[in-house]
Image (spheres, rainbow, N blue to C red):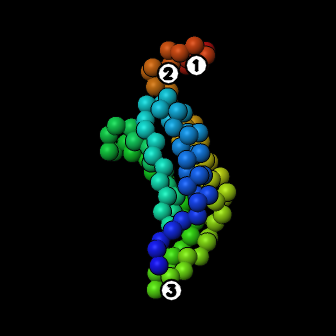
């Protein structure tokens, strides 16, 4: 039996990447979003392996011997959880030097 994932999961992953990739790029990093038959994850790389940040959410458990997949979370719950984790990462990240010089970007001490 082939391993499949719900089509709405792929759509959620595309929306997540489209919404967060520009915000992560402004902070000098790249965003990757991936999905398997049981998990969805996000990875942010800052150019060096030791600065890589990754989070994943298990949305289903697969019983290989039985050929069954049991859902643990809805696609909506996965989306909300990953967006929360990405928002937390963005809040903790200091602005890059190139972002600090743009109009409208707060400068420390002001």
Across the whole image, how many numbered discs are drawn on residues? 3
Residue 66 circle label = 3
Q: Viewed as shown, does residue 48 lie left or right of 80?
A: left
Residue in view at x 58 percent, y 60 percent: 7
> How far, Cα to Cα, is label 2 from label 1?
7 Å
Q: How crowded is mark 3: few (under 14 residues within 10 Å), some or many (20 or more)?
A: few
Do the residues under discs 3 and 1 have CB atoms within 8 angstroms?
no
Give the position of the C terminus as an image quadrant. top right
Residue 99 circle label = 2
Question: Splitting the image into 4 quarters, where does residue 30 fall?
Answer: top left
The x and y percentages for residue 17 are 53, 43
Question: Splitting the image into 4 quarters, where does residue 51 fall?
Answer: top left
Q: Residues within 10 Å of mark 2 (few under 14, many from 20)?
A: some
Residue in view at x 51 percent, y 63 percent: 39
Q: Mark 1 points at which residue?
A: 105
Please tell me whether mark 3 sits on a helix, a strand or a loop. loop
Do the residues under discs 2 and 1 have CB atoms within 8 angstroms?
yes
Question: Splitting the image into 4 quarters, where does residue 74 fall?
Answer: bottom right
Examine the rendered structure and indicate whether residue 23 appears above or below residue 40. above
The x and y percentages for residue 60 are 56, 70
Examine the rendered structure and indicate whether residue 19 appears above or below residue 109. below
Please tell me whether mark 1 sits on a helix, a strand or a loop. loop
> How far, Cα to Cα, is label 2 from label 3?
52 Å
Examine the rendered structure and indicate whether residue 29 appears above or below residue 6. above
Tag in front: 2 or 3: 3
Q: How crowded is mark 1: few (under 14 residues within 10 Å), some or many (20 or more)?
A: few
- For marks 2 and 1, the one nearer the N-term is 2
């Amino acid at each position: 039996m082939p391993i499949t994932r719900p089509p709405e999961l792929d759509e959620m992953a595309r929306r997540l990447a489209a919404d967060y990739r520009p915000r992560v790029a402004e902070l000098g990093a790249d965003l990757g979003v991936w999905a398997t038959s049981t998990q969805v994850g996000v990875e942010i790389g800052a150019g060096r392996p030791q600065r890589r940040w990754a989070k994943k959410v298990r949305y289903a458990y697969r019983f290989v011997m039985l050929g069954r997949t049991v859902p643990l979370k809805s696609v909506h719950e996965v989306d909300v959880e990953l967006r929360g984790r990405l928002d937390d990462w963005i809040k903790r990240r200091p602005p890059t030097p190139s972002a600090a010089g743009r109009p409208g970007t707060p400068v420390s001490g002001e």
